Image (tube, rainbow, N blue to C red):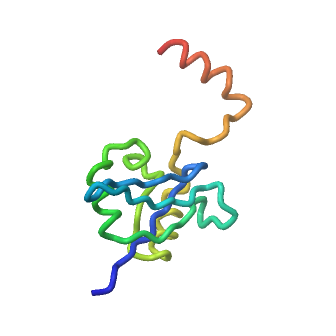
Amino acid sequence: MATEFVTVACRLPHGLHLDLMRNGARQRHTIAGANRSRLVNGAGFTSVPKEFWEAWLAKHKEMPFIRNGAVFAARSESDAAAEADQRSGDRTGFEGAEPGDVDRRIAELARE
């Protein structure tokens, strides 16, 4: 049976290493991030075996970058591009600061 793949989209600026331990050996897939020269709607795309992605996701589904949609998978690159377009306005937490917001944000953090 042929291996099925999904397209993992990553909007984090640095990309991501997805690691799983299986039978005492580490399996790793390096996911392209927004630091790549080829972006689709602000996301880097990487093809990953579907079974690996599902196993990795089951262990990491509560990670903030998964919960906020900064990293997600789709059945095809075109589906991932459409979802990345829908998520293009969502914040990842790595956006640059607006010059006028710096003082306001510092004040907010000081109150926390």
Q: Is residue 79 left or right of residue 58?
A: right
Residue at position x 39%, y 53% in the image: 19
Residue 111 placement (x, y as % from top left)? 51, 12
Q: Nearest the camera: 108 or 33?
A: 33
Residue at position x 28%, y 50% in the image: 59
Q: Is residue 21 above or below residue 3?
A: above
Q: Which residue is most to the top?
A: 111
Q: Nearest the camera: 91 or 15?
A: 15
Q: Is residue 60 above or below residue 2?
A: above
Q: Which residue is most to the front?
A: 24
Which picture quadrant has residue 56?
Answer: bottom left
Which picture quadrant has residue 4?
Answer: bottom left
Residue at position x 37%, y 43% in the image: 63
Q: In this view, does 77 lie above or below 16?
A: below
Which picture quadrant has residue 93?
Answer: top right
Q: In this view, does 67 lie to the left or right of 39?
A: left
Residue 73 placement (x, y as % from top left)? 40, 64
Q: In this view, does 24 lie above or below 82?
A: above
Q: Split into 4 quadrants, where in the image is the N terminus?
A: bottom left
Residue 11 placement (x, y as % from top left)? 54, 54
Q: Which residue is most to the right?
A: 99
Residue at position x 55%, y 53% in the image: 15
Residue 58 placement (x, y as % from top left)? 26, 54
